[in-house]
Amino acid sequence: MSYTVVIPARYGSTRLPGKPLADLAGKPMIRHVYERACASKASRVVVATDDQRIVRACQGFGAEVVMTSPDHTSGTDRLQEVASFLGLADDARVVNVQGDEPLMPPQLIDQVADALETFPEAAIATLCERIHSPQELFNPNVVKVVFDHQGFAHYFSRAPMPWARDHWHQGEVPVALPASYRAWRHIGIYGYRASLLHQFVRWPAAPTELTESLEQLRALYNGARIHVSEAEVAPPAGVDTPEDLARLSMLMSQENPS
């Protein structure tokens, strides 16, 4: 069963303006993301943007690109516009690959798409990886997820969870995690059913979403089921800042010396 990858790519990044067009090893970053997505089993890869400069760049290397509204408040809204524009059926699978993850393993793109096929009751599929350090667990920028024995999410939070009551005291960061403790970091790649995207944009922001600033909580609040799988391979970090870009440029130049 085929699926579609959509790559949201905004020009106006606060910390790194023009990020999708930033040069990495002689190519714009968006091209690296596109090529990674094309290496997956997706039947179609589409870039969704709000800027003509990105449109021209994508057309220059042969990518399919859709111009979307500049007024979207999230990548999910942009995805829904593309799904509607493409006329995707309600049961179509759509994978959101962020435009600032030029090293995204194609294997992970396939993994979230496959999860939607394996678990038909899931409206969304996403990934996670094990947390091993207290510093990561107690970092509010690291989103944690807890899920049931089948992998269906109970909750996502910036707070450490689950709380090891018998080992920790409020306000203290432990030196190490208990040997039997299991915690999971959410990895922000999503697969959606197109029908969920159309519902999502009609739902108001959920109280939990506003509190945690986590958009996926809107889906849970409205009863949509989210399946979480442990990532088959570790995802490299994306690009958020000029420092990230410099680090990745150095890494790629070392891997592909001229």
Image: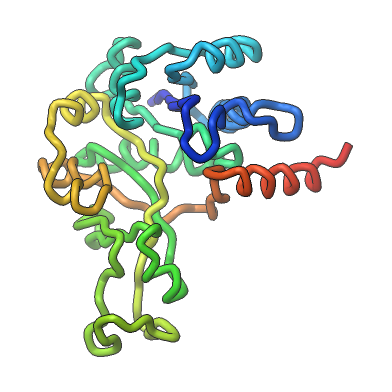
Residue at (64% x, 42% y) in the render: 245
**Residue 29 location in percent, x, y?**
62, 31
Which residue is the extreme one toward the right? Answer: 258
Display coloring: rainbow
Residue at (32% x, 42% y) in the render: 125
Give the answer, above or below, for where 70 lies relative to 177: above
Relative depth, front residue between 16 and 156: 16
Relative depth, front residue between 153 and 101: 101
Query: Total marks drawn?
Result: 0
**Residue 186 location in percent, x, y?**
37, 54
Give the side of residue 221 with respect to residue 184, left or right. Answer: left
Q: Quadrant of the N terminus?
A: top left
Give the answer, above or below, for where 80 lies relative to 105: above
Which residue is the extreme one toward the bottom? Answer: 166
Give the answer, above or below, for where 133 lies relative to 238: below
Relative depth, front residue between 206 and 103: 206
Q: Report whether residue 106 is seen.
A: no
**Residue 11 location in percent, x, y?**
50, 25
Give the side of residue 30 with respect to residue 76, left or right. Answer: right
Task: Name the image quarter holding residue 180.
Answer: bottom left
Give the answer, above or below, for where 107 lies relative to 22: below
Give the side of residue 229 with respect to residue 252, left or right. Answer: left
Q: Quadrant of the C terminus?
A: top right
**Residue 92 location in percent, x, y?**
30, 23
Residue at (37% x, 15% y) in the render: 68
Task: Name the image quarter holding residue 185.
Answer: bottom left
Relative depth, front residue between 129 and 120: 129
Q: Report whether residue 103 is seen.
A: yes
